[in-house]
Image (cartoon, grey):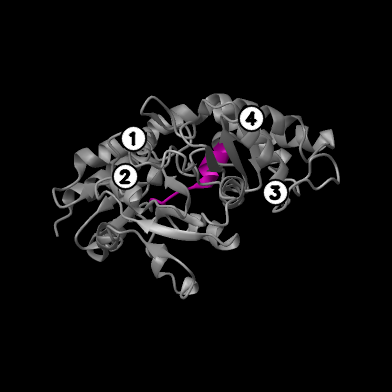
Amino acid sequence: MTSIPMNDLRRRYLRHEAELSRISRDVLASGHWISGPYNAAFCRDFAAATGVAHCVGVANGSDALEIALRCLVTDPARREVVTVANAGGYTTTACRLIGLIPVYVDIDEGSQLIAIDDAVAAVGSATGAVVITHLYGGLVDVPALRVALHAAGFGGVPIIEDCAQAHGLRGCGAGAGAFGDLATFSFYPTKNLGALGDGGAIVTNSAALAAQVARLRMYGWDGKYNVAVSGGRNSRLDELQAAFLSMLLPHLDADNERRRAIIDAYATAAADSIELVSSPHGTVGHLAVVLTGDRHRLAKHFNDRGIATDIHFPILDCDQTGWTGAEQRIGPAGLDVSRKSVDRILSMPCFPELTDSEVAQVCDALGSYSP
C-alpha cells in the first residue's frame, strides 16, 4: 500500500517549481540579499493579509517570541508569563533565555487551547504578559480573554499571540495576530505559510512597539552602529525567503480551505471512539489531531495501513528533564486536562497536497478502527 506521509514538502516545491526557480534567480542576481525590497514588500503584504498595521521580519519564530517578550516584559517586578504547557516548549524557551518565569495553566479538552478562566486566575501582580498559542491552527478567543482580564482588574497585562500554526486564521471578528499587543509567526517550512528555510515575523497595530521590535532585531540600534536599547540581537528575515513567502502568500487562503476540508472529512469518517480536536472559533487545519483512549493501538492501526502519524507534543513543558530545577509555577487550577490529554493526542497527515485518494485512505482507517 502507498505510504502516506505526515507531510511532503517536495510536493509543494514541485507545485510551484517554475515560480520559485525564477524568484531565486531574480533575488540572487540582484546582489541585495539582506533587508532589501523583497523583505519590505512581504512585510507590507503580510501585515495587510493579517489585518494589522505593522510587520517586522525576523530570522525565525523562536526569535520572534523572545523579542516580543523583551518588548513587553520590562518591569523586573513582573517576571511571570502565563502560558500553556502543551504547545511544544517554544514560549518556555524564550522565557528561559531572558530570565522570565513561565506560569502554566490548563487547557480546554476539546480544543486543546488555553482555558481562559484558568489563565485569568493565574494572573497577579507579578504577571508581565500572557502568551496564547493558536495551537494546531485553532483560534483562541482572545477578545474574551481581554474582557476577562479587564473584569479581574488586570486589563493592563499585555497579550502576545503565538501564531506559528495560525497563518490566515480568522474568527472572533478579526484575524489571528490582530488581537494581541504583539503577535509572532514562524515561517518554518511545514507551516501553513512556510518558507524554504527558516523565517519569522512579529506583527502589531502599535507603531511604537513595531519600532521597538525593529531595534531589538537589529542589535538594539537606533541608527547604524548606535545602540539605543539593551537586549538587542541580530535576527533578520532572509531576503530570499521573503521573496519565496511573497510568492506563496496568495495561495494561503486556498491551501487553508483544503486543510479544513481534509479535517472535515476526517471528522465525518471517524469512529465514535476517536475525537478530532477542534476550536469552536475557527481553524486553518495546521494539524489534524485526535484524542483517543489507546494512542499506541490507534497509531499501529494507521501504520499497518501505510499512514504516518506523529505526536504534537509528547511532553509537557513543566515535565521536561532539561528544565528540572528551573523556576516555574503551575496556575491555581492545576493541569489536570493537560496531563490527561498528553497521553491521548495523535496527529494524522493534513497538508494541502494530499490527494483525494490519500484522504480517502485516512478516512477509511479512521472509520474502521475499533478500540
Residue 352, position as x, y percentages in the image: 43, 37
Q: Name the residue under label 4.
A: 207
Q: Quickly name the residue at label 3.
A: 235
- Look at mark 2 in the image and give the residue it sits on: 116
Distance in Å between CA atoms under marks 4 and 1: 24 Å
Q: Which of marks 3 and 2 is nearer the N terminus?
A: 2
Residue at 44% in and 57% down: 88
Query: The residue tagged with tag 4: helix, strand or loop?
Result: helix
Type of residue at label 2? Ile
Q: Are there few (<14), some (14-19), or many (20+) residues within 10 Å of tag 2?
A: many
Q: Do the residues labelled 4 and 1 touch (CB within 8 Å)?
A: no
Q: In which quarter of the image is residue 248?
A: top right
| Label annotation for residue 144 | 1
Residues rendered magenta in the picture? 4-14
Of pointers 2 and 4, the one earlier in the residue sequence: 2
Residues marked 2 and 4 touching at CB (< 8 Å): no
Nearer the observer, 163 or 67? 67
Q: Nearer the viewer, residue 261 or 281?
A: 281
Task: Name the amino acid type tagged 3.
Answer: Ser
| Residue 156 in the figure: left or right of residue 263 | right
Disc 3 and disc 4 in contact, CB within 8 angstroms: no
Q: Distance between the residues labelled 3 and 2?
A: 32 Å
Q: Rounded to the nearest whole Å, what is the CA distance between mark 3 and mark 4?
A: 19 Å
Disc 1 element:
helix
